[in-house]
Amino acid sequence: MLNVNSSNTIPKHWAWVGSIVGLLLGLLVFAPAQWLAHSIAFISKHQLTFQNVEGTVWNGSAQTVMSTGVGATQEMVLPERLHWRLVPQWNASIQLFLKHDCCMSQPMLLTIKPLLQSVQFAIDDHQSRWPATWLQALGAPWNTVAPSGWLAVNTKQLQFSMSSQSFNMTGDATIDLQSLGSRLTTINPLGSYQLQVHGGHTPTVELSTLEGVLQLEGQGEWLGQRFRFNGEAKASAGNEDALFNLLGVLGQRRGSTSILKLG
């Protein structure tokens, strides 16, 4: 008869520890994507939510919904699905691969790295094209303007870091507002416009008109975490009456010009 010395057996409490660790690892690896959806909703105060969620936290997909927050009466749902894949790195950063069926021809790579007092984000050089109707979910004045058209996004070596007291950015981003329209006027499209974002010690934004009957221009900058923007909107000669209502919504009227101001 084989006699096994009790000193060579695994104590029961270590077996329980191993079981618990295995369970926790299993939960971590196979955590349902719904957990991520709840986190996104909480962080964004329900301005960004996921519906019809599938997969896990690390590899999943969902329909993307934008709104003004809890209790919003209007939601904007992007067609088709957003796909993501999270890959932890040895340097404590996380690589996030994003691909949207409607709006991205190639996946976008976002690298997220927690630092001592801030979080750093880096976006690979990327191009995408989004429906401008999604802007309505941001609330006033977009929900009144009800824009149509497209937003073409192009990033180059874009990095930014955020803390409780500061916002820093390097690299550049360009957003082209293509064939922009609005339900407040019979003229469609109104024109095409460009937002240029430049990083540096003081990140800046410049709005300009590429073409169109609605003329937009302005400049903005980030000071710490605060963003300030000043600009103006006006109608080209002969289109003042057709754009009267739209200009009144965009900003405070000064004669035939509307003043655009944020911050």
Image: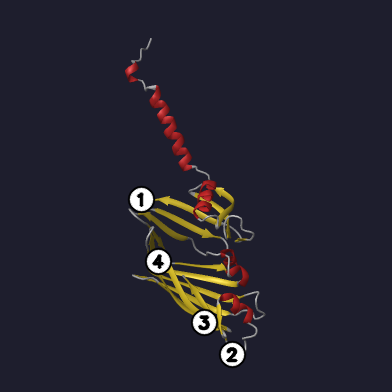
Quadrant where the N terminus is found in the figure: top left
Q: How many marks?
A: 4
Q: Are marks 4 and 3 in contact (CB under 8 Å)?
A: no
Residue under the point 50% across and 48% down: 57
Of circles 3 and 2, the one toward us is 2
Q: Residue furthest top?
A: 1
User: What is the CA distance from the residue labelled 4 to the residue labelled 3?
Assistant: 24 Å
Q: Given the image, on which type of amino acid does mark 4 rest?
A: Leu
Of circles 4 and 2, the one toward us is 2
* Element type at mark 4: strand
Quarter of the rendering containing residue 197: bottom left
Q: In the image, which disc is placed on residue 92? A: 1
Q: Is residue 50 above or below residue 145?
A: above
Q: Given the image, on which type of amino acid does mark 1 rest?
A: Ala
* Nearest to N terminus: mark 3 or mark 1: 1
* Element type at mark 3: strand
| Nearer-the-camera pick, 114 or 47 | 47
Q: Residue furthest bottom?
A: 237
Q: Given the image, on which type of amino acid does mark 3 rest?
A: Leu
Q: Which residue is mark 4?
A: 158
* Nearest to N terminus: mark 2 or mark 1: 1
* Nearest to N terminus: mark 4 or mark 3: 4
User: What is the CA distance from the residue labelled 3 to the residue labelled 2?
Assistant: 16 Å
Quarter of the rendering containing residue 129: bottom right
Residue under the point 61% across and 58% down: 72
* Element type at mark 2: loop
User: What is the CA distance from the residue labelled 3 to the residue labelled 1?
Assistant: 43 Å
Q: Which residue is mark 3?
A: 210
Q: In the image, which disc is placed on residue 237? A: 2
